Amino acid sequence: MLEKELVYRITGSAMTVLNEIGHGLREKSYERALCVELNFQKIKFTEQAVYSVYYKNVKVDEFIPDLVIENKVIVDLKTVENITDEHRGQILNYLKITGLEVGLLLNFKHPKLEWERLVLSN
């Protein structure tokens, strides 16, 4: 399984954040808290990195993922009722844009962390 250990460490960090500050906050609060926890766990990450989106070799937009962990895993944080196919499709597009293979959806809406790992093989 691609990046199994790293995904395990990221989800563990997310669970720690949720257990510490609880559910019901806005997405940005969890993103900032997760960054603190990742630093504490000595997991390298980039926050709000900018990736260009091209159509026929013309830049048409920019994509800014929440987090890129160790240049291996895209992390998209949510505070939604449920993770949907729309969220899954979005992260698969992010993987195409970045050239990475593993994405992680983290939903902090409820007392128990909801998460999904998605893989796009190159």
Image (cartoon, rainbow, N blue to C red):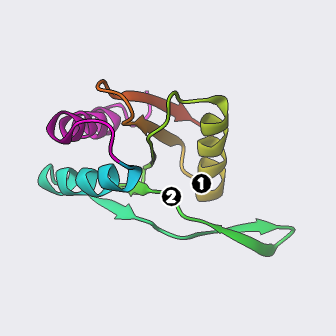
Residue at 60%, 38% (x, y): give it. 87
Residue at 53%, 33% (x, y): give it. 118
Q: Residues within 10 Å of mark 2 (few under 14, many from 20)?
A: some
Q: Position of residue 29 (x, y in %)?
A: 31, 54
Above or below: residue 109 compared with residue 66: above
Residue 121 visible in this rendered orientation of the protein: no
Q: Position of residue 33 (x, y in %)?
A: 24, 53
The quadrant of the rendering that contains the C terminus is top right
Q: Which residues are magenta?
A: 1-25
Q: Residue furthest top?
A: 112
Q: Position of residue 121 (x, y in %)?
A: 61, 37
Give the total number of marks visible in the rendering.
Answer: 2
Residue at 19%, 42% (x, y): give it. 21
Residue at 24%, 36% (x, y): give it. 18
Q: Amino acid at mark 1?
A: Gly
Q: Residue furthest bottom?
A: 58
* Residue 61: in magenta span: no
Horizontally, is 117 left or right of 90 in the view? Answer: left
Q: Residues within 10 Å of mark 1 (few under 14, many from 20)?
A: few
Which residue is under mark 2? 65
Q: Which mark is residue 99?
A: 1
Q: Residue furthest front?
A: 24
- What is the C-alpha distance between the residues marked 2 and 1? 13 Å
Residue 38 visible in this rendered orientation of the protein: yes
Q: Amino acid at mark 2?
A: Pro
Name the residue nearer the viewer: 16 or 69.
16
Horizontally, is 29 left or right of 104 in the view? Answer: left
First of labels 2, 1 by sequence position? 2
> Chief secondary structure of the magenta span?
helix
* Residue 17: in magenta span: yes
